[in-house]
Amino acid sequence: CWLKENLNIGTMIDSTQNPSDNGIIEKYCYNDDSIKCSIYGGLYQWDEAMQYDTTEGSKGICPTGWHVPSWNEFAMLKSFVGNNGNELKEIGQGTGGGAGTNTSGFSALLAGIRYNGIFYYLDNHTNFWTSRSAGNSSSYCIQLVNTANIIQGGQVDEMSGYSIRCINNLTVSELPVELTTFTASIINNNVKLNWNTATEINSYSFEIEKKISTNKSWEKIIAIKASGNSNKPSQYSYIDKNVIAGKYNYRLKMIDLDGSSKYSSIVNVEIVAPAKFELGQNYPNPWNPTTTIRYQIPINIFVIIKVFDALGREVATLVNEIKPAGIYEVTLNGRNLSSGVYYYQMKAGTFFETKKFVLIK
């Protein structure tokens, strides 16, 4: 949870002064008026608010058990209200399309800012520091304005005087993505991966990584675009096709927009080689314009599958290569064939089988 009011602690200094790392918390009050601090809270330079600790999520000047919010935590709040800043503003703050409704209970006041020794924008703007540094004397903030409902944010000069709204340590989420499930199932020699998230904050992508269980090195097989910001459950899936018989491990690398990442737990699968050679009946049959033929082989072997017309003339070659042990499907498109009876034939070592199928246009 968040503090309901802007932080107001420390000793007021003149707007022309800069705070220092002297063991005393130093604040600005709008127009150097202490009464403004009692209403709107203090305005703090970033280093002072962080108490000269650049670690994101640090306690800073917040009470014990609380900390200066991270960029992700403000992003989660932004997602929670659907980027509607009016839900964060106190009733009576803002005008027209920017009028506050405070449906979130955040009760933001348009406290103004201090910049280069001058105060600006009381009852027009408010800026909240995050605890994320951008380097080069800049850090990230969140901004609300009086005439619009959007929530803005970005990098600003750390010497600016902005408001501080602390967040309780117990609300910290370790991940920008709250992953609820990650499972794998086997369909023939394909591995279907499914995962669900409850919420996502600034999520960029999910990279699927795979390895043979006895190996140490992981291989990235694909990257799936994430939802970005979502406070609703999201579902994802991916099929790793034609996996060779063996034992495998899969995991997700969850990547944030800023490049930070975290891994999921590992799921294990085993693809078992078929016990025998087999050529299945195509489906559908009769067919038009495409049909699928399934076959399986128990060992690595050279496989040939060809299609013949009723007169025995070859009309298509579907497979002509060495295939690892496994179960496979191949598709035939009959757009260039005439209606009629056809035969498909499989050869693999000493295995030989032919089946009949019908194309009806």
Image (tube, helix red, strand yellow):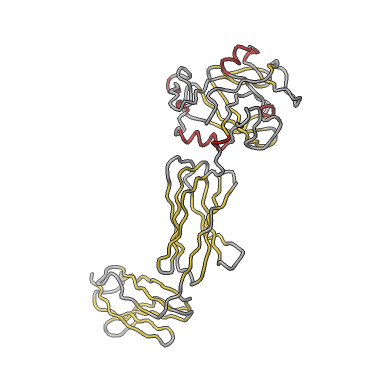
The C terminus - image quarter: bottom left
Position above or below: 214 against 263: below
Q: Residue at x 46, y 72 (%)?
A: 272
Q: Position of residue 62 (x, y in %)?
A: 63, 28
Front-most of residues 320 and 315: 320
Asked where in the image residue 165 lies, by quadrant, the reply is top right
Position above or below: 250 against 17: below
Q: Position of residue 201 (x, y in %)?
A: 51, 41
Q: How many marks?
A: 0
Asked where in the image residue 6 lies, by quadrant, the reply is top right
Position above or below: 124 against 57: above
Position above or below: 132 against 339: above
Which residue of the protein is positioned furthest toward the bottom in this rendering? Answer: 350
308 left or right, relative to 64:
left
32 left or right, relative to 178:
right
348 left or right, relative to 203:
left
Q: Residue at x 29, y 81 (%)?
A: 309
Front-most of residues 7 and 110: 7
Front-most of residues 137 and 56: 56
Q: Position of residue 181 (x, y in %)?
A: 46, 52
Q: Position of residue 311 (x, y in %)?
A: 27, 85
Q: Residue at x 53, y 58 (%)?
A: 266
Which residue of the protein is positioned furthest toward the right in this rendering? Answer: 22
Q: Residue at x 55, y 26 (%)?
A: 3
